[in-house]
Amino acid sequence: MAAAGSAVTDFLGQLFRYVPIQKLRLSQRSTLILGVGAVYIAFKQKDVLELMLLSYAFMVSGLFVPMVMGVMLKQRSTWAAPLSMLAGGLTTVFLEVKEIPIYLDINANAMGIIVSLVVYGMVHQLSKKTNAYF
């Protein structure tokens, strides 16, 4: 529910203006979709420890790059951090859940951090070129 609320308020709320009933329906649908995804991931795990490790992996690969860039860069873009968080975290979770072998046995967290860095760089550069907080 917290993820759905954040998605509707922080992400979609910035792009679209909703009347309250639309926002309620969107929140309900988002909660259902994210809840089904969470249940799917929970059933794929063998025990609680694996599920906790997966959630920590999601946080590490999603938050590392935006936190470092937020401290290092003077000019920030509105969308670079959240998009890189999603890209890095979802990449790690996807690779872990599907158990996809990675070239040279690179850790899924490292791949998530790389994807997060690439997305952050692309969105940040695009927002600088267009002079928009994209």
Image: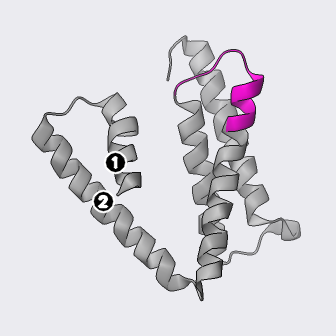
Residue that sits furthest to the bottom in the current view: 46
Label 1 residue SS: helix
Residue 5: image tag = 1
Q: Residue at x 38, y 45 (%)?
A: 7
44 vs 29: above or below: below
Q: Is residue 68 left or right of residue 19?
A: right
Residue that sits furthest to the right in the current view: 104
Q: Residue 115 in the image: x percent, y percent?
A: 69, 48
Q: Residue 121 in the image: x percent, y percent?
A: 69, 32
Is residue 72 inside the magenta stretch? yes
Give amino acid for label 1: Gly
Q: Residue 128 in the image: x percent, y percent?
A: 62, 15
Q: Decide: few, some or many residues near mark 2? Use Cα within 10 Å; few <14, some 14-19, many ≥20.
A: some
Q: Name the residue under label 2.
A: 31
Give me the C-alpha separation between circle 2 and circle 1. Answer: 8 Å
Q: In this view, does 108 lie to the left or right of 134?
A: right
Residue extent of the magenta highlight: 67-78
Q: Decide: few, some or many residues near mark 1? Use Cα within 10 Å; few <14, some 14-19, many ≥20.
A: some
Q: Which residue is drawn at 60% across and 65% down?
A: 55
